[in-house]
Image (tube, grey):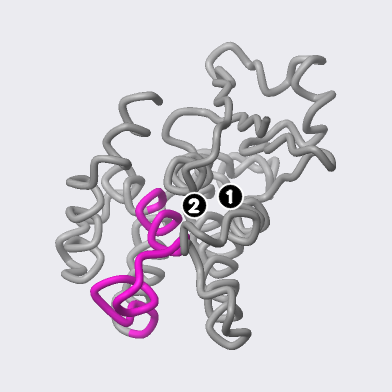
Amino acid sequence: MLKLYYAPGSCAVASHLALEHSGVSYEAHKVDFAKQEQRSPAYLAINPKGRVPALITSLGVLTETPAILAYIAQCFPAARLAPLDDPWQFAQVQSFNSYLCSTVHVAHAHRYRGYRWSDDEAAIASMKQKVPQTMKACFEEIENNLIKGPFVLGDHYSICDMYLFTITNWLEGDEVDVNWFPKVAALRQWMLNNPVVQKVLKAQ
Protein backbone atom coordinates (compact mmCIF):
# COMPACT_ATOMS: atom_id res chain seq x y z
CA MET A 1 0.00 0.00 0.00
CA LEU A 2 1.16 3.53 -0.75
CA LYS A 3 2.16 5.55 2.30
CA LEU A 4 2.26 9.35 2.23
CA TYR A 5 4.20 11.34 4.80
CA TYR A 6 2.94 14.90 5.12
CA ALA A 7 2.84 17.96 7.34
CA PRO A 8 -0.46 19.86 7.61
CA GLY A 9 -0.62 22.90 5.36
CA SER A 10 2.63 22.06 3.61
CA CYS A 11 3.16 21.40 -0.09
CA ALA A 12 2.32 17.76 0.71
CA VAL A 13 -1.36 18.75 0.61
CA ALA A 14 -1.15 18.49 -3.19
CA SER A 15 0.02 14.87 -3.08
CA HIS A 16 -2.61 14.06 -0.48
CA LEU A 17 -5.28 15.48 -2.77
CA ALA A 18 -3.99 13.50 -5.75
CA LEU A 19 -4.06 10.24 -3.82
CA GLU A 20 -7.60 10.88 -2.63
CA HIS A 21 -8.78 11.81 -6.11
CA SER A 22 -7.13 8.71 -7.58
CA GLY A 23 -9.36 6.41 -5.53
CA VAL A 24 -6.43 4.21 -4.49
CA SER A 25 -6.04 2.80 -0.99
CA TYR A 26 -3.24 4.56 0.87
CA GLU A 27 -2.06 5.50 4.32
CA ALA A 28 -1.33 9.09 5.37
CA HIS A 29 1.19 9.67 8.15
CA LYS A 30 1.57 13.09 9.77
CA VAL A 31 5.06 14.42 10.36
CA ASP A 32 4.90 16.92 13.23
CA PHE A 33 7.26 19.76 12.40
CA ALA A 34 6.57 21.41 15.76
CA LYS A 35 8.19 18.38 17.38
CA GLN A 36 10.97 18.30 14.77
CA GLU A 37 9.85 14.85 13.66
CA GLN A 38 11.21 15.59 10.18
CA ARG A 39 14.67 15.46 11.77
CA SER A 40 14.11 12.26 13.71
CA PRO A 41 16.21 9.20 12.81
CA ALA A 42 13.02 7.30 11.95
CA TYR A 43 11.90 9.86 9.37
CA LEU A 44 15.38 10.55 8.00
CA ALA A 45 15.60 6.84 7.25
CA ILE A 46 12.58 7.36 4.98
CA ASN A 47 13.57 10.73 3.53
CA PRO A 48 17.13 11.89 4.26
CA LYS A 49 16.16 15.36 3.00
CA GLY A 50 14.09 15.81 6.16
CA ARG A 51 11.21 17.30 4.23
CA VAL A 52 7.73 16.40 3.05
CA PRO A 53 6.12 14.95 1.07
CA ALA A 54 7.55 11.47 0.88
CA LEU A 55 5.66 8.65 -0.77
CA ILE A 56 6.55 5.04 -0.06
CA THR A 57 5.82 2.86 -3.07
CA SER A 58 6.48 -0.77 -3.89
CA LEU A 59 9.60 0.36 -5.76
CA GLY A 60 11.00 2.67 -3.10
CA VAL A 61 10.55 6.15 -1.68
CA LEU A 62 9.61 9.02 -3.95
CA THR A 63 10.11 12.67 -2.98
CA GLU A 64 9.46 16.11 -4.52
CA THR A 65 5.92 17.21 -5.25
CA PRO A 66 6.04 17.36 -9.09
CA ALA A 67 7.46 13.83 -9.23
CA ILE A 68 4.91 12.43 -6.80
CA LEU A 69 2.01 14.10 -8.61
CA ALA A 70 3.16 12.76 -11.98
CA TYR A 71 3.66 9.29 -10.52
CA ILE A 72 0.16 9.18 -9.05
CA ALA A 73 -1.39 10.42 -12.29
CA GLN A 74 0.50 7.83 -14.34
CA CYS A 75 -0.17 4.93 -11.96
CA PHE A 76 -3.91 5.56 -11.89
CA PRO A 77 -4.85 6.77 -15.39
CA ALA A 78 -8.55 6.01 -14.90
CA ALA A 79 -8.73 8.96 -12.49
CA ARG A 80 -7.73 11.30 -15.35
CA LEU A 81 -5.57 13.51 -13.16
CA ALA A 82 -3.38 14.56 -16.10
CA PRO A 83 -3.46 14.41 -19.93
CA LEU A 84 -1.27 11.32 -20.13
CA ASP A 85 -2.04 10.49 -23.77
CA ASP A 86 -0.79 13.83 -25.08
CA PRO A 87 2.97 14.39 -24.68
CA TRP A 88 2.67 18.14 -25.29
CA GLN A 89 -0.12 18.62 -22.76
CA PHE A 90 1.66 16.45 -20.20
CA ALA A 91 4.76 18.58 -20.73
CA GLN A 92 2.59 21.62 -19.92
CA VAL A 93 1.65 19.92 -16.66
CA GLN A 94 5.30 19.38 -15.84
CA SER A 95 6.18 22.94 -16.80
CA PHE A 96 3.50 24.45 -14.59
CA ASN A 97 4.25 22.25 -11.60
CA SER A 98 7.97 22.87 -11.98
CA TYR A 99 7.32 26.61 -11.87
CA LEU A 100 5.37 26.21 -8.63
CA CYS A 101 8.14 24.10 -7.14
CA SER A 102 11.24 25.95 -8.29
CA THR A 103 10.02 29.55 -8.27
CA VAL A 104 6.81 30.12 -6.29
CA HIS A 105 7.58 27.81 -3.39
CA VAL A 106 11.09 29.21 -3.14
CA ALA A 107 9.75 32.78 -3.07
CA HIS A 108 7.43 31.79 -0.22
CA ALA A 109 10.23 30.03 1.66
CA HIS A 110 12.19 33.27 1.94
CA ARG A 111 9.70 34.38 4.62
CA TYR A 112 10.33 31.47 6.98
CA ARG A 113 13.55 29.81 5.86
CA GLY A 114 15.94 32.56 4.85
CA TYR A 115 18.61 30.69 6.82
CA ARG A 116 18.82 28.30 3.88
CA TRP A 117 20.45 31.04 1.80
CA SER A 118 22.25 33.24 4.30
CA ASP A 119 23.65 33.39 7.82
CA ASP A 120 23.46 37.18 7.84
CA GLU A 121 20.53 38.40 9.94
CA ALA A 122 20.12 41.56 7.90
CA ALA A 123 20.04 39.56 4.67
CA ILE A 124 17.46 37.18 6.11
CA ALA A 125 15.32 40.13 7.20
CA SER A 126 15.62 41.64 3.72
CA MET A 127 14.53 38.36 2.10
CA LYS A 128 11.52 38.19 4.39
CA GLN A 129 10.54 41.76 3.59
CA LYS A 130 10.66 40.98 -0.13
CA VAL A 131 8.21 38.05 0.01
CA PRO A 132 4.94 39.98 -0.54
CA GLN A 133 6.42 41.54 -3.68
CA THR A 134 7.84 38.32 -5.11
CA MET A 135 4.75 36.24 -4.34
CA LYS A 136 2.51 38.89 -5.90
CA ALA A 137 4.68 38.85 -9.02
CA CYS A 138 4.51 35.04 -9.18
CA PHE A 139 0.74 35.04 -8.97
CA GLU A 140 0.44 37.81 -11.54
CA GLU A 141 2.31 35.50 -13.91
CA ILE A 142 -0.01 32.62 -13.04
CA GLU A 143 -3.15 34.73 -13.36
CA ASN A 144 -2.21 36.47 -16.59
CA ASN A 145 -0.26 33.85 -18.49
CA LEU A 146 -0.53 30.35 -17.06
CA ILE A 147 -4.16 29.59 -16.12
CA LYS A 148 -6.14 28.74 -19.22
CA GLY A 149 -9.37 28.70 -17.21
CA PRO A 150 -11.44 27.72 -15.42
CA PHE A 151 -8.71 25.23 -14.45
CA VAL A 152 -4.99 25.53 -15.08
CA LEU A 153 -5.19 23.36 -18.21
CA GLY A 154 -8.50 24.78 -19.37
CA ASP A 155 -11.63 22.67 -18.92
CA HIS A 156 -9.93 19.70 -17.28
CA TYR A 157 -9.25 19.47 -13.53
CA SER A 158 -5.76 18.10 -12.90
CA ILE A 159 -2.85 17.72 -10.53
CA CYS A 160 -1.86 21.27 -11.52
CA ASP A 161 -4.95 22.63 -9.78
CA MET A 162 -4.24 20.60 -6.67
CA TYR A 163 -0.72 21.98 -6.45
CA LEU A 164 -1.78 25.56 -7.18
CA PHE A 165 -4.54 25.35 -4.57
CA THR A 166 -1.99 24.22 -1.99
CA ILE A 167 0.30 27.18 -2.56
CA THR A 168 -2.58 29.65 -2.94
CA ASN A 169 -3.49 28.88 0.65
CA TRP A 170 -0.17 30.40 1.74
CA LEU A 171 -0.89 33.82 0.24
CA GLU A 172 -2.57 35.35 3.27
CA GLY A 173 0.48 34.61 5.40
CA ASP A 174 2.61 36.20 2.71
CA GLU A 175 0.52 39.40 2.85
CA VAL A 176 -0.94 38.86 -0.62
CA ASP A 177 -4.69 39.06 -1.24
CA VAL A 178 -5.91 36.16 -3.39
CA ASN A 179 -8.76 38.37 -4.62
CA TRP A 180 -6.23 40.37 -6.61
CA PHE A 181 -6.23 37.36 -8.93
CA PRO A 182 -9.82 36.55 -9.98
CA LYS A 183 -9.07 33.30 -11.83
CA VAL A 184 -6.93 31.98 -9.00
CA ALA A 185 -9.53 33.01 -6.43
CA ALA A 186 -12.35 31.34 -8.37
CA LEU A 187 -10.38 28.11 -8.67
CA ARG A 188 -9.56 28.16 -4.97
CA GLN A 189 -13.23 28.60 -4.07
CA TRP A 190 -14.24 25.77 -6.42
CA MET A 191 -11.79 23.50 -4.69
CA LEU A 192 -12.89 24.54 -1.21
CA ASN A 193 -16.40 23.45 -2.23
CA ASN A 194 -15.14 20.10 -3.57
CA PRO A 195 -16.02 17.20 -1.20
CA VAL A 196 -12.73 15.41 -1.87
CA VAL A 197 -10.76 18.54 -1.00
CA GLN A 198 -12.85 19.05 2.12
CA LYS A 199 -12.12 15.46 3.18
CA VAL A 200 -8.38 15.92 2.83
CA LEU A 201 -8.32 19.27 4.62
CA LYS A 202 -10.35 17.81 7.47
CA ALA A 203 -8.00 14.82 7.71
CA GLN A 204 -4.99 17.13 7.90
Type of the residue with mark 2: Ser
Residue 177 appears left or right of 23: left
- As rendered, which of 67 and 138 lies closer to the eye? 67
The spot of residue 44 in percent (x, y) is 80, 25
Q: Residue at x 22, y 45 (%)?
A: 192
The spot of residue 196 in percent (x, y) is 31, 41
Q: Residue at x 79, y 15 (%)?
A: 42
Q: Quadrant of residue 38?
A: top right
Q: Residue furthest front?
A: 78
What residue sits right under mark 1 in the picture?
123
What is the secondary structure assignment of the residue under circle 2? helix
- Classify 43 as above or below 60: above
Marker disc for residue 126: 2
Give the CA distance from mark 1 to mark 2.
5 Å
- As rendered, which of 107 and 118 lies closer to the eye? 107
Magenta highlight on residue 147: yes
The spot of residue 148 in percent (x, y) is 32, 82
Q: Residue at x 68, y 44 (%)?
A: 116
Residue 48 appears left or right of 67: right
The region drawn magenta spans 145-167
Magenta highlight on residue 163: yes
Which corner quadrant holds the N terminus?
Answer: top right
What is the secondary structure assignment of the residue under circle 1? helix
Residue 20 appears left or right of 5: left
Q: Residues within 10 Å of mark 2 (few under 14, many from 20)?
A: some
Residue 85 appears left or right of 155: right
Q: Are marks 1 and 2 in contact (CB under 8 Å)?
A: yes
Q: Residue at x 52, y 55 (%)?
A: 105
Q: Quadrant of residue 51?
A: top right
